[in-house]
Amino acid sequence: MSAFVSVAYVLVTFTLVVLFFSSRRLIADKAKLNELLHSPAQTLEQTILETNSVVGIKRNGRTDYIIPKEFTSRVMNDDRTFNFDRGLAKLLNLQLVLKLHGGTFFKDMQEIVLEFFVRRLATTVTQIYPVFQKHAQQLKEQHPPVDLTVHAQKAMSEAMMLVLFGQDYVNEDDCQAATNLSEDIAEFVGILQNQAWFSRNFPRLWHLVTWVRVGVFRIALGFGMSIGLRLWSDISHLSENPEEKKTNPTILPILVDRYRSPDGAIPVTSKLWIMVLLTTGVFGSTRQIATNIVGVVFYLALNPDYQTILREEIRSLRRVDSHPNLQTLKHAIQTDSFIREVFRMKGDALTAVRMTTCDVPLGEHIIPKNHLVFPMTYMCNRSAPAGECSDKFQGMRWVSTRWSADKVDAGYLPFGLGKWACPGRALAIAVIKIFLFTTFPDAELELQGQTYTVADRSYMASLPPKGHLLIKSL
């Protein structure tokens, strides 16, 4: 009996010890998770510097790997081993979408952006400049402080509805539907996932619920019923009347030509695919660019010395050309340098992702197959290519180099790197400049309290900072 009691005592003691240290480990993990949520860049940088190796972190029900900057070029350019499509699809909850249409989702989006936005960027700039002029006047008439995010999203929604679908879609209801769609997609792809306890702790269930609640009811049915049916009708009309494509400046003729069958008709499956691409295009061109506008303006509001420099440059260019075009924007090299430096220094921890296609050795570690790999953007952006004092913000750093804000390299990752670098980055930079050209030259900017906040610094590229902007007319 005593032997039994002794064994039982040992087992109980061992169990308590295990539970004790397990609880300590869990508490440590929770503390680490809390640090990653509130200061991911600094936390990951410290861990990488301490270990001098690849770092694995558990979040959202999976293990992700963060790599030091010396592996960045290899990971970003070796698509056979570190796959872009599968990585981004897993990160954004789009695995099902990637299985549709032969897995061409990201390839199709890239080619369409290049064909429609990049090749006709000059036309787009001329087309949307008056839209931003109108919204700039409305912004100045608002009682301070103003919600810049709401204003930027409204301006972007109207501009993109005009460019993508034409004047018939430029009205309050359709523009609001585009804004709502952008917010819905942000939730659908997980940009807001870290902000809720349920989504962080039950990621698979959250994905399922989100697919139904947001994907089906709010995106497919909500946007589909408000704008989708009219777009469907316009697509059918263009396929039946091809002679009208020459006089239609929107994106629809490009999509009709791309997905029509040899007999000229567009199958239902192709129309559905076009709708998927269009909703993604609205999100990318509306929410993402609006977020970047807010980030640049807030940085400018916190740096009055740079306001003087940029104001003089923009005023000078506007005196030469009262109707600025793409060439005018390109001549704004000080403004461009400031934008590039904001993108470099605003604190993004992770902006690019790949997925391993096999077990891959990196340094002393082997990253398992089918795991997400992230270059450490924060450290890459502060590396040698930026020159001296690379950890300091210097808005005019790039003037002498003429490295434009949309030029990517291993030391500048806000738009990714390699063949999958964001194809719409030139549009994004042009729109930010348009916003500054129309809003800023006759105003002085200030942030209330001289500060702003970011809800989740893991997704700074997609979550607009929160702050109260004060605009004083000059």
Image (tube, rainbow, N blue to C red):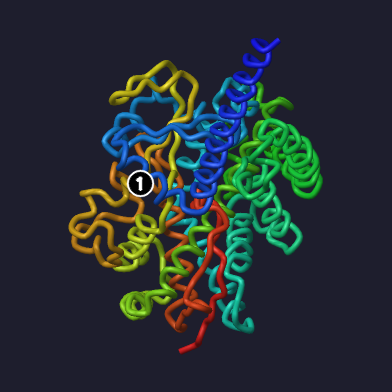
Work out whether residue 47 or residue 5 is closer to the camera in this orientation and state it.
5
Determine whether, in the image, residue 155 is placed left or right of residue 422: right
Determine whether, in the image, residue 149 is placed left or right of residue 120: right
Q: Position of residue 257 (x, y in %)?
A: 58, 33
* Above/below status of 55 relative to 370: below
Q: Neighbour class for label 1 at 10 Å: few (<14), some, many (≥20)?
A: few
Residue behind mark 1: 46
Work out whether residue 346 or residue 29 is closer to the camera in this orientation and state it.
29
Q: Position of residue 418 (x, y in %)?
A: 35, 35
Residue 302 visible from this viewpoint: yes
Residue 247 visible from this viewpoint: no
Q: Residue at x 56, y 47 (%)?
A: 284
Determine whether, in the image, residue 302 is placed left or right of residue 400: right
Determine whether, in the image, residue 87 is placed left or right of residue 405: right
Q: Residue at x 69, y 48 (%)?
A: 184
Give the residue furthest to the bottom.
474
